[in-house]
């Protein structure tokens, strides 16, 4: 009887335990980002005679990037809602919209980096630029990996339909994506807004 | 049997409407907070020190808006499992960031004086 209860418990709780595990990963990722933020805040004035945050920040450009990421966070929420309602085609549709918004964000960021490097303000120029590229680049890398993951899930949803495994994977990616948007709030506030203030 | 299925459907539908409302509230609040932050900095509406404090406050408010509305973190018995590691992470982040700033500013001060 005890075994029966244990098995039932394990089966019922399996997915929530898994989601908890993924949540722990996200929390440790938070700590990784906080180290990069601390480094950036300490080094941000060490420009070694080169350009600082004030010179390289283009506020309207950053604002557009922010809107893309915020919108993608919302559309992912819509995909999760469609998943609850078992609308497979809508899930795929919203995921594609989210993917395109996320891709626009990454493209804008890569463009910004490419411009900086071509103007001679690469990460090797000063402590401030190294910290800037590391912090913003790590966030961009997370978003890029999230996009790749989303592409895989779009294909998997189309092939395997909305089975429990796919649902769980979509939930993980949803947590990851919302987390990346939250990190971005602090990137635009600390790096860009405080840079020009 | 059929009654319980209908009930379940109704509950699920209500849950869906509730989630949708919370996503929309989250989106609108985040947009407002973001626009406010960019506007006060873009127009230089106050001194640098004040701007630092206000944009940081706006960011922290937006953090909570997104955590509650998008991540749906809550203090219910099931949600508490997610809440506790979150509080732990927040404590570590605060110690790390404020500790680094404190030590390095102190070091700068003693190098200059």
Image (cartoon, coloured by chain):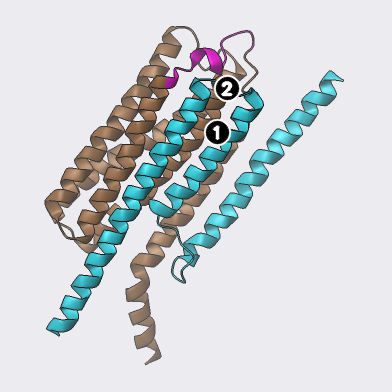
Chain colours: A brown, B cyan
Pointer 1 indicates a residue of which chain?
B
Q: Which residues are magenta?
A: A48-59
Disc assigned to residue B55: 1
A190 over A86 or under it: above or below? above
Residue A53 lies, in percent from the top left, at 55, 18
Considering the numbered disc 2 on the image, is that residue within a helix, a strand or a loop?
Answer: loop
Residue A68 lies, in percent from the top left, at 32, 32
Give whichever of B91, B53 is nearer the camera.
B53
Give whichever of A61, B42 is nearer the camera.
B42
Residue A108 lies, in percent from the top left, at 34, 23
A160 in the magenta segment: no
A55 over A31 or under it: above or below? above
Which image quarter is the N terminus of chain B in?
Answer: bottom left
Give whichever of B82, A9 is nearer the camera.
B82
Q: Residue at (20%, 77%) from the top-left corner?
A: B7
Residue found at the very far bottom of the displayed protein: A1
Pointer 2 local density, CA inside 10 Å: few below 14, some 14–19, many at least 20: many
Judge left or right: residue B4 versus residue A24: left
Contact? badges 2 and 1 (CB < 8 Å): yes
Residue found at the very far right of the displayed protein: B113
**Same subunit under labels 2 and 1?**
no
Q: Residue at (26%, 39%) from the top-left corner?
A: A98
Disc assigned to residue A197: 2
> What distance separates the C-alpha of mark 2 from that of mark 1?
10 Å
Give whichever of B1, B30 is nearer the camera.
B30
Which image quarter is the C terminus of chain B in?
Answer: top right
Pointer 1 local density, CA inside 10 Å: few below 14, some 14–19, many at least 20: many
Pointer 2 indicates a residue of which chain?
A
B96 over B78 or under it: above or below? above
Rendered image quadrant of residue A4: bottom left
């Amino acid at each position: 009887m005890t075994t029966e209860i244990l098995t039932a418990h394990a089966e019922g709780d399996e997915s929530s335990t898994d989601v908890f595990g993924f949540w722990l990963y996200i929390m440790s990722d938070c700590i990784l980002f906080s180290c990069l933020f601390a480094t950036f805040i300490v080094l941000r004035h060490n420009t070694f005679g080169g350009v600082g945050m004030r010179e390289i920040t283009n506020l309207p450009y950053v604002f557009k990037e922010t809107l893309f990421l915020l919108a993608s966070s919302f559309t992912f929420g819509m995909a999760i809602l469609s998943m609850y309602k078992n609308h497979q085609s809508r899930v795929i549709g919203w995921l594609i919209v989210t993917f395109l918004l996320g891709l626009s964000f990454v493209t804008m960021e890569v463009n910004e980096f490419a411009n900086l490097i071509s103007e001679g303000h690469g990460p090797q120029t000063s402590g401030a630029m190294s910290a800037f590229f590391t912090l913003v680049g790590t966030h961009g890398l997370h978003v890029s990996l999230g996009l790749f993951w989303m592409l895989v899930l779009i294909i998997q949803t189309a092939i395997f339909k909305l089975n429990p495994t796919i649902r769980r994977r979509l939930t993980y990616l949803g947590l990851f994506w919302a987390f990346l948007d939250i990190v971005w709030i602090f990137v635009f506030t600390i790096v860009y807004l405080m840079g020009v203030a | 049997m059929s009654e319980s299925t209908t009930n379940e459907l109704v509950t699920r539908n209500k849950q869906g409407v509730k989630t949708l409302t919370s996503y929309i509230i989250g989106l609108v609040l985040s947009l407002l907070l973001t626009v406010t932050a960019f506007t006060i900095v873009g127009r230089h509406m106050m001194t640098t020190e004040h701007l630092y404090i206000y944009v940081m406050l706006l960011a922290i408010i937006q953090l909570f808006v997104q955590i509650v509305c998008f991540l749906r973190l809550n203090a219910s018995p099931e949600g508490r499992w997610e809440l506790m590691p979150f509080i732990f992470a927040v404590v570590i982040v605060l110690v790390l960031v404020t500790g680094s700033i404190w030590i390095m500013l102190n070091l700068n001060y003693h190098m200059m004086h």
